[in-house]
């Protein structure tokens, strides 16, 4: 203890056996800098506190066995920088806090067994950067927070067993970047938040079991980029949000069981790009939203069971490209929206059971290209719209039961090409509209029962 002024700087070390338990406190002014090391066996438990001013910098390490439990706090000013490590066994539990100013930087690690639980906080200014890890067993639970300024960057990892639960937050400025991981078992639950500025970038993962639940949020500026994954079991539930600027890019994945529920949002600018995947069981429910600019590109996938429900929205500019799939059971319900510019390209697929309900919209420009598929049961209800330019190309397929109701609209330019297929039962009701230019080509097929009602307009 060197050059400590007007402070309480107590050091207590009790029942330490066969270990290196060094404590170094240099240039601490007007602070309480208590260090307590109790019942540490066969370990290295170094504590280093340098240039701490006017702060409370308490370190408590209790019942640590056969581990390396180093604590390093350098250049902390006017802050509360408490470190608490209790009942850590056979692990490396390093805590490093460097250049923290005027902040609360509490670290709490309780009941960590046989794990690596490293915490690194570097260049945090005027913020609350709390890290809490409780009941982590046999895992790697690393937390890294670098260059966080004026923000709340709380990390909570509770009841993680036998998993890798790494959290990395780099270059976060003036934001709330909370990460919460609760009741994760035997999984890889990595969270990476890089270059987020002036935003709320909350990540919540609750009750994830035996899965890979990686979350990556990179280069988000001035936005709300919340990710919520709740009750995911035995699945891969990766979420990737890259290069989102000035937008709301919320991702919610709730009650997904035994499935792959990947969400990818890349290069979204100034838009609302919300993705909601709720109550998906035993399915692949991939959502991909790439290169969306200045638009609303909401994707909602609710109550999908045992199906492949992939949604792909690529190169949408300045448009509303909403995709809604609700109550799809045991089916393939793929939606693909590619190269849509300045348009409204809404896709709605509701109450589809045991069917293939694929929707494909490719190269739609400056148009309204709405697709609605409602109450389709046990059927193939494919909708394909390709190379539609500057037109209204609405497709409505309602109350189709046990049938094939394919709609194909190809090479329509500057026209209104509406297709309506209503109340078709147990039939093949194919509609094909090809090479229509500058025209109105409406097709209406209503109340067809048990028949083949093919319509071709070329």
Image (spheres, rainbow, N blue to C red):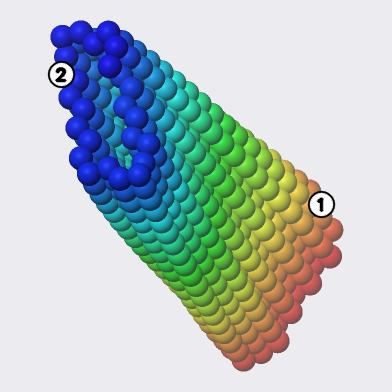
Residue 270 visible (yes or no) = no
Residue 90: x %, y % from top left: 39, 53
Q: Residues within 10 Å of mark 1 (few under 14, many from 20)?
A: some
Which mark is on residue 437?
1
Residue that appears at 19% across and 32% down: 12
Quarter residue 245 falls in = top right
Q: Helix, strand, or loop for circle 1? A: loop
The quadrant the C terminus occupies is bottom right
Report the front residue among 96 and 183.
96
Residue that appears at 59% across and 39% down: 242
Q: Is residue 287 above or below residue 121?
A: below
Residue 365: x %, y % from top left: 72, 43
Report the front residue among 447 and 349.
349
Report the front residue among 255 and 30.
30
Quarter residue 183 falls in = bottom left
Residue 344: x %, y % from top left: 59, 46
Left or right of residue 115, residue 450 in this image:
right
The residue that mark 2 highlights is 8
Outermost residue on the front side: it is 18
Q: Is residue 400 above or below residue 142?
A: below
Q: CA distance from mark 1 to mark 2?
A: 84 Å
Quarter residue 55 falls in = top left
Query: Are dots 1 and 2 in contact, CB under 8 Å?
Result: no
Residue that appears at 38% across and 50% down: 66
Q: Helix, strand, or loop for circle 2? A: loop
């Amino acid at each position: 203890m060197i050059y400590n002024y007007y402070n309480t700087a107590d050091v207590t070390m009790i029942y330490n056996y066969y270990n290196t338990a060094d404590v170094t406190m240099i240039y601490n002014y007007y602070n309480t800098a208590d260090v307590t090391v109790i019942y540490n066996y066969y370990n290295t438990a170094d504590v280093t506190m340098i240039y701490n001013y006017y702060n409370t910098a308490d370190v408590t390490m209790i019942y640590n066995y056969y581990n390396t439990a180093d604590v390093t706090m350098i250049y902390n000013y006017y802050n509360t920088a408490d470190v608490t490590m209790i009942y850590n066994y056979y692990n490396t539990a390093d805590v490093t806090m460097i250049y923290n100013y005027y902040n609360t930087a509490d670290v709490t690690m309780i009941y960590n067994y046989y794990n690596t639980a490293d915490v690194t906080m570097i260049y945090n200014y005027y913020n609350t950067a709390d890290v809490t890890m409780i009941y982590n067993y046999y895992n790697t639970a690393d937390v890294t927070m670098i260059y966080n300024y004026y923000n709340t960057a709380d990390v909570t990892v509770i009841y993680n067993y036998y998993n890798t639960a790494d959290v990395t937050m780099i270059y976060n400025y003036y934001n709330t970047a909370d990460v919460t991981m609760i009741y994760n078992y035997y999984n890889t639950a990595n969270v990476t938040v890089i270059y987020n500025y002036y935003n709320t970038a909350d990540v919540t993962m609750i009750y994830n079991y035996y899965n890979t639940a990686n979350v990556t949020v990179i280069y988000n500026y001035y936005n709300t980029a919340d990710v919520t994954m709740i009750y995911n079991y035995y699945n891969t539930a990766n979420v990737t949000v890259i290069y989102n600027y000035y937008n709301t890019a919320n991702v919610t994945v709730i009650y997904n069981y035994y499935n792959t529920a990947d969400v990818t949002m890349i290069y979204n600018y100034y838009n609302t790009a919300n993705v909601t995947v709720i109550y998906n069981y035993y399915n692949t429910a991939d959502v991909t939203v790439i290169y969306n600019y200045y638009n609303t590109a909401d994707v909602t996938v609710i109550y999908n069971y045992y199906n492949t429900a992939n949604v792909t929205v690529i190169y949408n500019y300045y448009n509303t490209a909403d995709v809604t799939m609700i109550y799809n059971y045991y089916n393939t319900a793929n939606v693909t929206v590619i190269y849509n510019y300045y348009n409204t390209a809404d896709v709605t697929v509701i109450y589809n059971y045991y069917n293939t309900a694929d929707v494909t919209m490719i190269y739609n420009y400056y148009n309204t290209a709405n697709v609605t598929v409602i109450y389709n049961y046990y059927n193939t209800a494919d909708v394909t719209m390709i190379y539609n330019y500057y037109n209204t190309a609405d497709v409505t397929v309602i109350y189709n039961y046990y049938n094939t109701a394919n709609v194909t609209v190809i090479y329509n330019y500057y026209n209104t090409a509406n297709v309506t297929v209503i109340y078709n039962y147990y039939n093949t009701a194919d509609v094909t509209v090809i090479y229509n230019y500058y025209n109105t080509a409406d097709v209406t097929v209503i109340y067809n029962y048990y028949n083949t009602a093919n319509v071709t307009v070329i």
